[in-house]
Amino acid sequence: MFVKYIIVLLSCAFLLAVVPLTPASAGDPDKTVGGINPNHYVCVTPDHVVINLDSDAVDSSGNFDPDIEVDLEELEDDCDRFKDSQDARVELLRQSRLEGFVFEFHPAPNAPGGWQGVASSDVLVVASGPGFEIFWGSEKDGFYYFDYLGAGPVTLNLRLPPDAHPINPNITVVTDGFARVVTVPLGFYRGDTPPDDVEALRLPAGVTRFSTLPPADTIYEDFLVSGDDPDTGIVSGMPNVGGILPSDQSVSTIVLAVIMLAVLPAAGILKLRQRRSNEIER
């Protein structure tokens, strides 16, 4: 009878160790964040090129059909059957692009606002967001870009030497993951005296379609699309988050430890009784 008791306890301990408890969800009071739209999943190559499939809602050009109901299992099966299936995979759409120019502003009495902007190379541009931080050094003409961004807030800043100071730090753009280009010019100055009127600063003509710098600490939920109206491309402010968190094993670990603390002494006592019984029989 005692052996059966030990076997039952050990079986319970084993089940607690291998079977996860109910996964913990993150987010709202109802314990959900809001599921990710399955239509935002696509089959892509390792360099994020979208593979045209009949089971997805987005083609290789980034055209989106909201009326298509995507079945993720079917999409994964179709992606696996692709001729380069060893490299293809299903992932959330990451086709958004941030780009712009970095300008250094110098005092210039003859320039509008008394300052003149010049494209600056080799300036480190930092794009950061939930769980990531990426860098790009501005090119010879001051140009920078970040490709293959998913949906969510991306904040742009300049990493400057001690004698330089950003003019419009913390520009946040809420991208949507689709194939759109968002343009954000960034500026800085050197020395201890900043420009008197930032709004009066003018960007060099012909370098970018924008004539002024966007204000600091601004969150854009409207795309500033190159060659388009600034009002086009309104996006939602919700990043691609959702699903469930990894299972929390702390409770099962504690229960397992308690069971083992009960079983091990009991097993020891049983062993001693067996030895004494054997000695008496002898």
Image (spheres, rainbow, N blue to C red):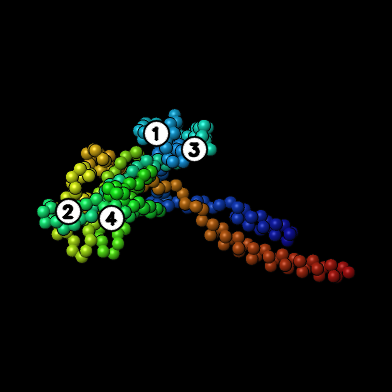
Q: Residue 170 carries which label?
A: 4
The amino acid on which the numbered mark 4 sits, given as a three-letter code, is Asn
Q: Residue 106 carries which label?
A: none
Per the image, label 3 sits on a secondary structure element best described as loop
Per the image, label 1 sits on a secondary structure element best described as loop
Q: Which residue is drawn at 44% across and 47% down?
A: 243
The amino acid on which the numbered mark 3 sits, given as a three-letter code, is Ala
Q: Is residue 130 visible?
A: no
Precedes in sequence: disc 1 or disc 2: 1
Numbered disc in front, either 2 or 3: 2
The local crowd at label 1, few if under 14, some if 14 to 19, many if 20 or more residues have their Cα within 10 Å, is: some
Query: Is 194 on the left or on the right of 147, as rendered?
Result: left
Precedes in sequence: disc 2 or disc 4: 2
Precedes in sequence: disc 2 or disc 3: 3
The alpha-carbon separation of the residues under discs 1 and 2 comes to 42 Å
**Residue wearing tag 2:** 116
The amino acid on which the numbered mark 1 sits, given as a three-letter code, is Ser
Q: Nearer the viewer, residue 36 or 206?
A: 206
The local crowd at label 3, few if under 14, some if 14 to 19, many if 20 or more residues have their Cα within 10 Å, is: many
**Residue wearing tag 3:** 88
**Residue wearing tag 1:** 60
Q: Residue at x 16, y 58 (%)?
A: 107
Residue 148, how many percent across, how many down? 38, 43
